Image (cartoon, rainbow, N blue to C red):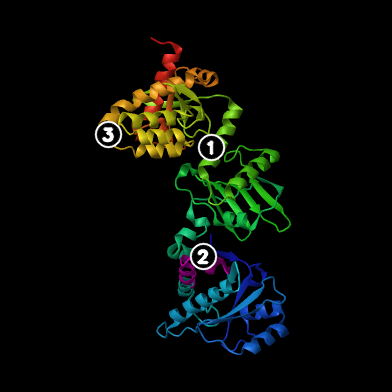
Amino acid sequence: MSSIEIRKIGITDLDTDAIVNAANDGLWAGGGVCGAIFKAAGYDQLQTACNKIGHCDTGSAVITPGFNLKAKYIIHAVGPRWMDGEHEEPKLLYSAYRRSLELAVKNGCKSIGFPLISAGIFGYPVDLAWRQALRACRDFIKRGNQIDIIFAVLSDSIIEIGQKTLKQVYPQIANAVKDDWKTFDMPAQHDTFTLVRSFTSEQMKALRKGNIPKAMEDKWFWYMEGDTLFAHRSWTGFCFYRIDFSSDDHHKVTVNRDPEQYKGTSVDEDRKTLNKLLNWWSGAPYDYYHEWLSETVDNLNKAGMVYDKLKIAKQKVEALFFYRASEPHGYLSNWYMSPFELDGVHFSSAEQYIMYNKCLIFGDAKSAGAILKEKHPRVQRAIGRGVKGYVDAVWAGQRQLVAVRGLLAKFSQNEDLKKKLLDTGDVWLVECDDSDTIWSCGIPLNEDERFDAGKWRGQNILGFALMEVRSILRGDE
């Protein structure tokens, strides 16, 4: 996936496949960015290459080798001089970016570094220059071109304007910045240690993207400034970790040691925790849910089995919440692989049994047979949802009866699962899936509304069926 990033760095320090020189139409060495590029590439050889080309029209671009630079190519783009905005300046500036990108892709470049063209001695207003630059890059990417774009800027105020403009022009691809969330700086009480670890370019791209929480409960807000990552707990805004990345893979970590903000005191524990977090954060896209689940499992393993509290009207009861078959308590899921036989038919899971019987109830033998041939519960469910002759009122009355019968066979024929279910005692069993308002409570596993039955958006049929099966197996009156 392509990216657009604004970074505080000199353009000659970029290791992109190409960098762009804010050139003049005669392609001779100038001052500012142009002068820095000529100096770093090697003045004589770069000027000789430019002389062979001779000229470049305003709004266009040409390409030369990168010579002594890290970049393989230098693309010389000629932006317009600002007069009053009424002499085609926006059109010409947009064109200079577009042509630069076209040349980069044509020459096999996967990444490109830009200065803010025309915003220096050519006098183009910075905010308007950013808007044309980012619109051109956005449009180029949206046409299906794959390229990573970095704007190399040294001025903090210009970077700030660029970040705000990027969020307006292309919010889907904008990196997180400090102002996106409530933050408090690292306190005076802190510790430091070295984290030895390498990151791929794709992992660094994901970290630079940052994360803006969708809600306070999302736990982490992080963003990067230059090569420094700041990680804040979302609901307090306190900075827990600061990581100064180094090219030698020995990264300096500063960790919060204010006891009122963070209880951690062990460098070894922080190193372990931070490595886990970076594993999640450097994935693309960031998988918040499973990062949250991983931490929850760690805490459960440390504390032992501790049930949650579910509010029902004015009383509170113990509850066990579950979701996917691969997650904690996943054996309660209908998708959990647990073979059993019923009515002379072999089933691989409770989901297969329920969907099979749903088809039989409506006389769709063909779909019932197809469900028995399929191995994955997702496909079985899809076939069951498309059953011919379906009548909602009939299935609403039958589904829990079907589920109880299938679940009874599942747990009675698998002794280890039977023991696990009986060991839950009288705890309420609640499936958490925000995409299902019939079988589950309709609330995701990582949202606090699941703790209040009055806020459920679903019926939790599976949870109640499991509780009924548990009573039958236990021999309750």
The amino acid marked with disc number 1 is Leu
Q: Estimate the x, y position of residue 375 in percent, counting from the top left.
A: 49, 35
- Horizontal side of 120 relative to 245 (left or right) equals left
- Quarter of the image with the C terminus is top left
CA separation, marks 2 and 1? 35 Å
Q: Secondary structure at mark 1?
A: helix
Which numbered dot is residue 240? none
Neighbor class of circle 2 (other Cα within 10 Å; few <14, some 14-19, many 20+) is: some
Of circles 3 and 2, the one toward us is: 3
Neighbor class of circle 1 (other Cα within 10 Å; few <14, some 14-19, many 20+) is: some
Q: Which residue is mark 3?
A: 392
Q: Which residue is mark 1?
A: 293
Q: Based on the picture, tell me whether residue 137 belongs to the magenta stretch.
A: yes
Q: Nearer the viewer, residue 410 or 242?
A: 410
**Labels 3 and 1 touching (C-beta < 8 A):** no
Neighbor class of circle 3 (other Cα within 10 Å; few <14, some 14-19, many 20+) is: few
Q: Estimate the x, y position of residue 133 in percent, counting from the top left.
A: 49, 72
Ranked by sequence position, the earlier of labels 3 and 1 is 1
Ranked by sequence position, the earlier of labels 2 and 1 is 2
What is the span of residues highlighted in magenta in the rendered image? 133-162
